[in-house]
Amino acid sequence: MPNLERVNAAAKQAAQTRFTSLLHHVDQAALHRAFRRQKRQASAGVDGMTVAKYEERLEQNLHDLCDRVHTGRYRPQPVRRVYIPKADGGKRPLGVPALEDKSRTRKGFNDIHILQGVW
């Protein structure tokens, strides 16, 4: 059972249990799963990094990302704002994040349903 599923099970068993930190569950394996969920044909992020380019040094990149997250050195890059046309003639804003930011946040969004039992 993945770590966050165990946390969810513990939270359901003992509703009064308090969780002070869940960061230790964001490990290299979790980031690897999040990276694998990236759309391979997605456009490059604001940093110019593509999935294929990042994958060339995948284990090194994920190790570095995990290390930066756990030591507090990880800082998300600014999101590039672009506007795409709408059918009614207006424009819709679209944010283009860096590839690592997509992977990191995708990990959080996909695991949020598991953590619902914690809150």
Image: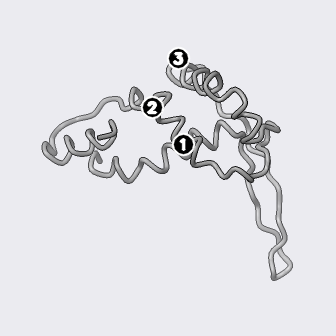
Question: Looking at the image, is mark 2 or mark 3 earlier in the sequence?
Answer: 2
The amino acid pointed to by label 1 is: Ala
Q: Which numbered mark, 2 or 1, is in the foreground of this view? A: 1
Which quadrant holds residue 98? top right
Q: Secondary structure at mark 3?
A: helix
Kindly indicate the quadrant of the structure image that contains residue 45.
Answer: top right
Q: Earlier in the sequence, mark 1 or mark 3?
A: 1
104 shown above or below 95: above
Residue picked out by circle 2: 26
Of the pair 52 and 98, the residue shown nearer to us = 52
Q: Of label 2 and label 1, which has the lower sequence position?
A: 2
Return the mark for residue 71: 3
Q: Residues within 10 Å of mark 3 (few under 14, many from 20)?
A: few
**Whether label 2 touches label 1, CB < 8 Å:** no
Identify the residue at horizontal 66%, vertical 52% (top origin). Answer: 39
Query: Against 71, is 49 above or below?
Result: below
**How many neighbours does mark 2 have within 10 angstroms: few (below 14), some (14-19), or many (20 or more)?**
some
Provide the residue designation for mark 1.
Answer: 34
- CA gap between label 1 and label 3 equals 20 Å
- Identify residue type, mark 3: Thr
Q: Position of residue 9 (x, y in %)?
A: 21, 45
Q: Nearer the viewer, mark 2 or mark 3?
A: 2
Cα separation, mark 2 vs mark 1, equals: 10 Å
